[in-house]
Amino acid sequence: MKKTVFIFGALVLALLTLFKLSKYSFVSGNTSIEFILAAIAIIFFVIGVMINRKVLHKNKTSGKEIDHKKITQLGLSKREYEVLCEIALGLSNKEIANKLFVSESTIKTHVSNILVKLGAKRRTQAIQIAKELKIISF
């Protein structure tokens, strides 16, 4: 995280320096505004390509690498696993209940069981643990 903040901070600093230099260059009359805008556009393009390349080439876990043995070891039922997947999508208890055609109190019970079985205190922590255990692929 610190590396990302440092990179973007350096990027902003470099862009501010570029803008100041282009301002002085334009004011002194050495270059035209079209050349300055073209240079800035090219720099933004190159930065965008570099960021895109880094994002696209990250090792992503595919949805097929779910550890089904771990799910059974944890004792998660099929319905609890469904609820866990819906929580990972960011749905509320009411939305999950409507989607799975059960009552909201039933969903609350499933969420409580999931939290106990995963050893989590909050829904977000449960999702984080589930990702680390590779039982969800979101």
Image (tube, grey):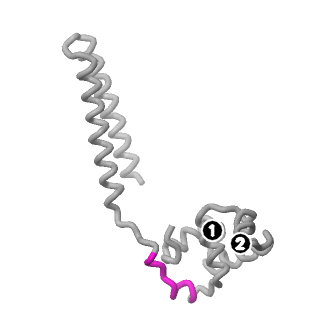
Work out how far the residue at label 1 is from the one at label 2, CA to CA, in angstroms: 10 Å
Indicate the position of residue 38 as horizontal and vertical percent values.
26, 27
Residue position marked by numbered label 1 in the rendering: 86
Drawn side of residue 28 relative to residue 80, left or right: left
Of callouts 1 and 2, which one flags the residue occurring earlier in the amino acid sequence? 1
Local packing at callout 2 (Cα closer than 10 Å; few below 14, some 14-19, many 20+) is some
56 over 116 or under it: above or below: above
| 1 or 2: mark nearer the eye | 2
Task: Tell me: 7 left or right of 127.
Answer: left
Question: Which residue in the protein does label 2 denote?
Answer: 100
Q: Residue furthest left?
A: 30
Q: Disc 2 marks which amino acid?
A: Leu
Label disc, if present, on residue 101 of the rendered structure? none
Q: Is residue 72 above or below residue 127?
A: below
Q: Which residues are magenta?
A: 64-72
Q: Residue at x 64, y 81 (%)?
A: 117
Tag 1 secondary structure: helix
Q: In the rendered image, which quarter is residue 124 located in?
A: bottom right
Which residue is at a point 30% across and 32% down the rendered structure image?
Answer: 41
Whether 44 is among the magenta residues is: no
Type of residue at label 1? Glu
User: Which residue is found at the position 29% from the left and 39% from the top?
Assistant: 45
The image quadrant where one finds the N terminus is bottom left
Task: Assess whether mark 2 and mark 1 are in contact (beta carbons under 8 angstroms).
Answer: yes
